[in-house]
Image (cartoon, grey):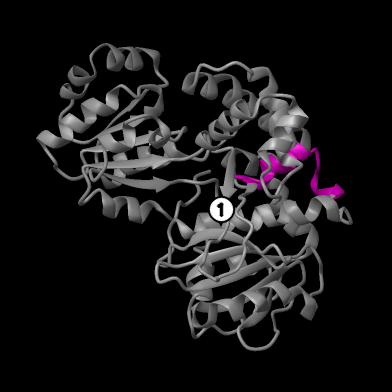
Amino acid sequence: MLYPRFIVNQVIEALKDSPVVYITGARQVGKTTMVQQIARDKHPATYRSFDDLTTRGAALSDPHGFLKNFEGPIVLDEIQLVPELLHALKLEVDEDRVPGRFIITGSANVLTLPRVSESLAGRMAIFNLYPLSQGEIGRKPEKFIDTIFDRAFSLPKMDGEDRIGLWKRVTNGGFPEIQKRAAESRKEAWYKDYVTTILQRDIRELANINGLMLMPKLLELLATRLSCLLNSAELSRTMQIPQTSMKRYLALFEATYLIHRLPPWSGNLGKRLVKTPKVFFVDSGLAAYLMGIETQHLEGQTIQTGPLLENFVLSELIKQASWSRTKPGFTHFRSQTGQEVDIIMEDRRGRCVGIEVKAAATVRSANFKGLKWFEKQLGERFIRGVVLYMGKASVPFGNHFFALPISTLWQI
């Protein structure tokens, strides 16, 4: 079953003016399927994958000669396996900057590799392909971000989903393969193989490091720290490994799109702010697997449900941002006096929407405390504050503040 990818139109537009289009994202999110479809229907191109050892060997032995052998546009899949090719790619583009000449994909972020970002600066359009959004799964484009930033926003006239249905979405996450598997045992088997592939293959190919045996345990430990401030020193003590090694492992988890660090908001408020990022997983289903929880076991487990739900909401927002007009940045806010906001979306004009996530069926005025404090600090830059919760009703809580069902994310 092919799912629509809402970012594809932007990719097609970029191919009209950019010599190189780079599509990056985790393994098994559908990059290959998408670029093959583009190369077949929208932008005819030759396809080559570096997962094929013969193709990889040819590119490694003579990078310049490899590229010279192709006429017209070409798709180069899994470019992180042949980083040596990127310099040759730069020279080819400098000789002929025809738009849409190269489409490259990577399951590890090659921009973190030495000299890569310099090599292709100004020559490349970059797109992140994430696991499926709930709208892509349901084949309905989402407009929550653009709608919530609109000054004319009004309460949506729709009911939220039931809690069991919502938790099923959270624990399923967005990997296409998981959507096909009904049995929990089959989902667990897929996640187990997925993690093994990333840790034993992709990370090994990215970096020659010791400690691969520790990485599964570290990944599971991080799943217990969802939405918490990232404390490398505490993780280092718990795992009994040096902080330098810990920081490198975390960077590799990010480079292979397992985890995401949500940076702290750093506005000029004249206040002392906590300047530590929070840690999340790119996919809530993977996080649930590592936490050892299933849909039917979530109700009432507030210690686990709150952070996992926040992870799910952030993941959905980041996916939507990749194709929204607004394209906000994402941060969190916490002051040293205890005021906090789970997620802040900030557009290019510095306007902000604050999001709180609650794993409860009801919302109280107290749930808006951090959002209202944040509004006072920002003034006119503050657009509105939203509490996303597990109930079904959309309710106003005064001017610029709303309680909305979590399913509003993919229903508007």
Asked if one can make out residue 134 in the rendered structure from this viewpoint, the answer is: no
Q: Which residues are magenta?
A: 280-297
Provide the major secondary structure of the magenta segment: helix
Image position, residue 160 (x, y; %): 71, 71
Name the secondary structure under disc 1.
loop
Crowding near the residue tagged with mark 1, few <14, some 14–19, many ≥20 C-alpha atoms within 10 Å: some
Q: Is residue 178 above or below residue 240?
A: below
State the residue in front, 72 or 249: 249
Q: Residue furthest right?
A: 300
Quadrant of the rendered structure where residue 67 is? top left
Q: Position of residue 101 (x, y in %)?
A: 20, 38
Compared to residue 250, the image places residue 301 above or below, namely: below
The residue tagged 1 is 263
40 to the left or right of 203 = left
The quadrant the C terminus occupies is bottom right
| Relative depth, front residue between 225 and 196 | 225
| Residue depicted at x 73% and y 76% | 369
| Res 371 visible | yes
The residue sitting at 59% across, 37% down in the picture is 258
- Where residue 313 appears, as percent x and y from the top left, is 64, 58
In this view, the residue in front, 377 or 66, is 377
Residue 286 is left or right of residue 87, and the answer is right
Examine the rendered structure and indicate whether residue 397 appears above or below residue 285: below
Q: Residue at x 35, y 55 (%)?
A: 9
